[in-house]
Amino acid sequence: QVPVQESGPGLVKPSETLSLTCTVSGDSLTNYYWSWLRQPPGKGLEWIGFIHFSGSTKYNPSLESRVTISVDTSKNHFTLNLNSVTAADTAVYYCARDRGGNIDLWGQGTLVTVSA
Amino acid sequence: DIQMTQSPSSLSASVGDRVTITCRASQSITNYLNWYQQKPGKAPRLLIYAASRLQGGVPSRFSGSGSDTHFTLTISGLQPEDFATYYCQQSYSALPYTFGQGTKVDIK
């Protein structure tokens, strides 16, 4: 069983909303912060934001107007919604465990392409 | 945002070499500096946290040092599995966390 696993559509149309879910296995969401990050093809890493099981969030200011991260502790998963996407949002999206800024457990990543 | 600058952007090295990668922060981050290794098609892997603390399961040939604005990652005795891209990341401020641009280590 993969400890942290992203799921969601691999193709999103421009102007629509990208939605991804991260399912956590073998651990409880309540013990840590949980982050979303992304990596455009051939480029570096960008932190999107994190959530605590209490629901408190913090987002990258560059994306804050378009991002929502939520948590469902009963299902042991958290979700990313990014609205009004453009081709610039095409990337591999990672969910990960955030131990006070040390991102120590990563999902395998999922490629999301924004294209009509 | 705190800007993180790595050097070099790439380097070629041989198995057994000692390799040093530098990361500079645009302002003091005390020791809130982490290092990651990423291989093609894979997620990053945490190597070093808090500038010098080795993550569990990471070989001891990896070491980190530095504080304030200047940090280094050293690989003492490069192994074939170490050819990868390395990123530094500051966690001093989560508004936002920021990464260096990466250093690609390939085979000479």
Image: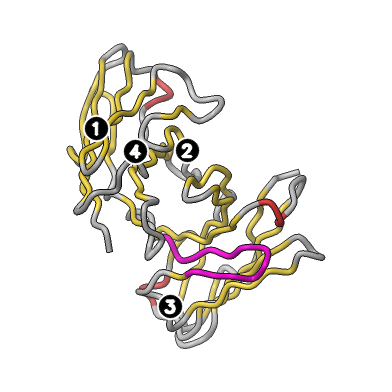
Q: Which residues are magenta?
A: A47-58
Check if mark 2's residue and mark 1's residue have beta carbons within 8 Å. Answer: no
Instruction: Give the residue at mark 2.
Output: B46
Check if mark 1's residue and mark 3's residue have beta carbons within 8 Å. Answer: no
The prevailing secondary structure element of the residues shown in magenta is strand
Query: Residue at point 80% right, 64% down?
Result: A75
| Place of residue B108 in the rendered image (x, y in percent of width and height, measured from the top left) | 22, 22
* Image mark 3: chain: A
Query: Residue at point 46% right, 88% down?
Result: A15
Amino acid type at mark 4? Tyr
Amino acid type at mark 1? Ile
CA neighbours of label 1 inside 10 A, class few (<14), some (14 to 19), many (20+): many
Dot 1 falls on a residue whose secondary structure is strand
Amino acid type at mark 3? Glu
| Place of residue A87 in the rendered image (x, y in percent of width and height, measured from the top left) | 38, 76
Instruction: Give the residue at mark 3.
Output: A64
Instruction: Give the residue at mark 1.
Output: B21
Q: Earlier in the sequence, mark 4 or mark 2?
A: 2
Dividing the picture into quarters, in which one does residue A85 lie?
bottom left
| Place of residue A25 in the rendered image (x, y in percent of width and height, measured from the top left) | 75, 49
Q: Which color mode does the image show?
A: secondary structure
How far is disc 3 from disc 4 in space, using C-alphas? 27 Å
Instruction: Give the residue at mark 4.
Output: B86
Check if mark 4's residue and mark 1's residue have beta carbons within 8 Å. Answer: yes
